[in-house]
Amino acid sequence: MKVSAFSFHLPPSLNAAMPPERRGIRRDYVRMMVLDRESGRMEHTAFHQLSAYVRPGDMLVMNASRTVPAVMTADLRTQGSASARTVEIRLARRLNEAMWEVLPVAASLSTGDTLVFSSLLHAEVTDTTRPPFATLVFSQTGTKLYDSIYALGEPIRYEYIQKKWELDYYQTVFATVPGSVEMPSAGRAFSWELLFKLRRQGIGTAYLQLHTGLSYLLDDNKPFDPSEHYEHYVIPEATATAITQTKQAGGRVIAVGTTVVRALESAARRDTALQAQSGWTNLHVERSFPLQIVDGLITGFHEPEASHLDLLSAFVEPSLLLDAYGEAIREQYLWHEFGDMNLII
């Protein structure tokens, strides 16, 4: 069974259209379905009860990438034209201090065009050879560029979210390093209170960064092939050491999010022993992939035919995964970045 072709009907009512805080509950009080990797046995609980399912000596690894407001508008000035028109640009992935790959929405860009975002920020189109994306070189770099992006942009939202929620709702409590254009949402349900509780229990925590790229081309498009989806990751030395020590002591490494799985398993393919490193990854984890580092996964619920389901099938037999998703629908779990959680262990 190929999970990328895994199709099921997701009732629109199960699309979480607002943050849990706006539904009247704390972020760590969303529901959680616990799925046993081997047996497929399921339990239904709440995320703040996570400590009942992990044990002293285990390690939670989280993505500390911070979400940037990736939807921006600009005046497009084409070569040879005196007039300008307003266009929407979605940041897709950061290439260096001044350069981003972007997705123009309902617009066509050509090399040499200029985009004026404000009196302080403009960009030149330098490459259009990877459609539908274009490469921009901004007039600002580093922190100044991020300051402008945060001042001018809005968070990406898809068709199931009608209201423009503030950027704070798209951040995890531990996010520190800006760079993700979509929220690494598996970590959203953590509160500092829960993190401290887990630490007091002897559960380790460690952080890495994988800056999530744009996963959907437009609201009505399906995700593109994961092998074409390059994302940048950084694994600090302290994290690599903590993971190695956890494995040697017999503890489990539990990834908080598919982004963490992608980063750690990419690193393991580059080095036999996990080392501090940074780089780009287009790793596609699927059923036949031999997981070397990660023993468990905390994630949200993924929509039909999403490539994330390929990754989940590396942890759970596809038939068991299909049963679990059917159960989640019957139990009215909520989907997407503001939805409920799934612990696979």
Image (cartoon, helix red, strand yellow):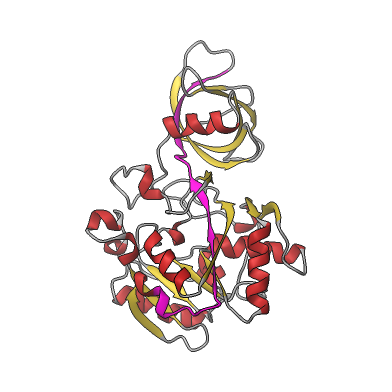
- Front residue of 339/287: it is 339
Left or right placement of residue 205 versus residue 243 in this view: left
Tell me the quadrant of the picture where the N terminus can be found.
bottom right
Q: What residue occupies the far top of the structure in this picture?
A: 82
Residue 300 appears in the figure:
no
- Front residue of 126/43: it is 43
- Front residue of 218/299: it is 299
Q: Residue at x 42, y 53 (%)?
A: 173
Q: Residue at x 52, y 64 (%)?
A: 308
Q: Residue at x 58, y 43 (%)?
A: 93
Left or right placement of residue 343 versus residue 126 in this view: left
Q: Residue 177: x percent and y percent?
A: 54, 46
Residue 81 appears in the figure:
yes
Where is residue 151, by image quadrant?
A: top left
Where is residue 250, by image quadrant?
A: bottom right
Q: Residue at x 71, y 58 (%)?
A: 276
Q: Residue 129: x percent and y percent?
A: 67, 37
Residue 52 magenta:
yes
Left or right placement of residue 115 versus residue 169 in this view: right
Where is residue 167, by image quadrant?
A: top left
- Front residue of 72/219: it is 72
Left or right placement of residue 52 versus residue 267 in this view: left
In this rendering, the count of numbered labels is 0
Residue 28 magenta:
no
Q: What residue occupies the far front of the structure in this picture?
A: 200
Which contiguous range is marked in magenta? Answer: 50-78
Q: Residue 270: x percent and y percent?
A: 76, 62
Q: Is residue 281 above or below residue 3?
A: above
Q: What residue occupies the far bottom of the structure in this picture?
A: 39
Q: Residue 339: x percent and y percent?
A: 35, 62
